[in-house]
Amino acid sequence: MQATFNIESKGQTRAVEVELNHLIVAGWAGRDIAAIEHHIEELAAIGVPRPTSVPLYYRIGANQFTQEPVVQVVGPHSSGEIEALVFEAEGQLCLSIASDHTDRKLEAYSVALSKQVCAKPAAKDAWLYADVEEHIDSLILRSWITENGERKQYQDGPMSTLRTPRDLISGYDGTFAQGTVMTCGTVGAIGGIRPSTVFEMELHDPVLNRSLHHRYEIEILPEVA
């Protein structure tokens, strides 16, 4: 499948078509063991088994990648989480954001399946990785949900708590080249993991004073037997 990214670098933006053949979710990607344990405990609270090793690389069907503003899911049990997204375009590594939207009910049975059944919404805007690599730890991941009609902050944490995208790429037992996209781990949820019909996310760069944004809505399909 193809995706279009608007890549910004040094004040200039150009649209680039990227052929996507492989989608990888890098899970348990924390740099701090205590932070990893916190996220493991968050998920354990809703019945998700502990990982066998960290990080883990989940292969997801490339057709689950989407830049659409609405995604459809079966049942009310799924939720999003912001992650940095890396991919190659025209021979250069680029950085954007995506949501590792996951079915939390299914996650208690199989993490891999819970990720596979949900679309992975991503932003259309991106940056050249080279422009942020020297201050990658300063970037801030944030997200918001709508709860009881109110917009509430759901995540807020620096990328310094996560392995760098370069580290995750080097640890992947496979080829990372043009056609591959990888999400790079998340930060803890404020108030615990829970669903929402609206998910907003932002990657903020305080050094260059700019942000990447994406917002999507979740349409819940009936869960029938």
Image: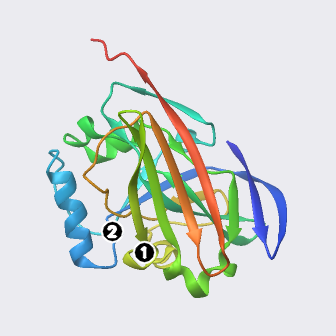
Residue 177 position in % (x across, y down) = 63, 66
Residue 107 drawn above or below residue 73:
below
Quick one: label 2, few (<14), some, or many (20+) residues within 10 Å?
A: many
Query: Residue at label 1?
Result: 171
**CB atoms at circles 1 and 2 under 8 Å apart?**
yes
Q: Amino acid at mark 2?
A: Pro
Between 27 and 206, which is closer to the camera in this rendering? 206
Helix, strand or loop at label 2? It is loop
Residue 153 drawn above or below residue 224:
below
Q: Is residue 127 left or right of residue 49?
A: right
Which colour assignment does the render follow? rainbow
Disc 1/disc 2 C-alpha distance (Å): 8 Å
Residue 43 drawn above or below residue 162:
above
Q: Residue at x 32, y 56 (%)?
A: 189
Q: Quadrant of the N terminus?
A: top right
Between 197 and 112, which is closer to the camera in this rendering? 197
Task: Check residue 55 in the rendering and tell me which mark sits there, or answer none.
Answer: 2
Q: Residue at x 20, y 62 (%)?
A: 52
Q: Amino acid at mark 1?
A: Gly
Of marks 1 and 2, which one's residue comes earlier in the chain?
2
Q: Residue at x 59, y 58 (%)?
A: 180
Helix, strand or loop at label 1? It is helix
Residue 33 position in % (x across, y down) = 24, 77
Q: Is residue 61 left or right of residue 48?
A: right
Tell me if I can see residue 51 in this picture. no
Q: Is residue 49 left or right of residue 101?
A: left
